Amino acid sequence: MQVKSQFPIYWKPLFLKPVFKERIWGGQALREIFEYEIPTDHTGECWAISADPNGPSVIENGKFAGMTLDILWKKHPELFGNPEGDLFPLLTKILDAHMDLSVQVHPDNSYAMMNENGELVFIIALLY
């Protein structure tokens, strides 16, 4: 017996190919801990979910395979619940800071909404 889906749109998980960024302070933890195939031994950032024009994730599976996340967001907003706004609201990064970095100060929510396109930063630290 075949069950008809209650969802009229594409309803399968999208697997994304991450974007890697070489940084002078980067290392090999993305390979050693997360088993990513990193491009160099100084890979400092993994953009796991990105529609940023400087490195959008590429969809790896299904009927949207080969399309970048930013294009999918623009062409098929129904897949995301028809949200308002032109820009995909999430950039998820995993950092490998093999060297000490300077402290960065990020704005509070009210300042970010008015001046920084609503940037919100979460930091999860993994020390090894």
Image (tube, grey):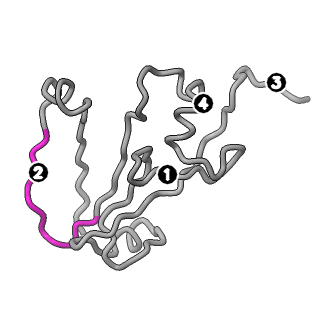
Give the Cα distance between marks 4 and 1: 16 Å
Indicate the quadrant where residue 126 lies.
bottom left
Q: Secondary structure at mark 4?
A: loop
First-in-chain label (4 vs 3): 3
Residue at mark 2: 104
Q: Which residue is mark 4?
A: 76
- Estimate the x, y position of residue 78 in percent, counting from the top left: 59, 24
Residue type, numbered disc 1: Ser
Between discs 4 and 1, the one toward the N terminus: 1
User: In the image, what residue type sits under mark 2?
Assistant: Gln
* Residue 28 in picture, x, y percent from top left: 34, 75
Q: Which residue is mark 1?
A: 57
At horizontal 33% and vertical 71% (from top left) the residue drawn is 43
Which is more N-terminal, label 3 or label 1? Answer: 3
Q: Nearer the viewer, mark 4 or mark 3?
A: 4
The answer to whether residue 62 is above or below residue 87 is below
State the CA–CA distance, disc 4 to disc 3.
22 Å
Task: Name the N-terminal-most of marks 1 and 2.
Answer: 1
Instruction: Describe residue 109's horizontal placement relative to residue 73 as left or right.
Output: left
Q: Are marks 3 and 2 in contact (CB under 8 Å)?
A: no
| Start-end of magenta stretch | 96-106
Element type at marker 2? loop
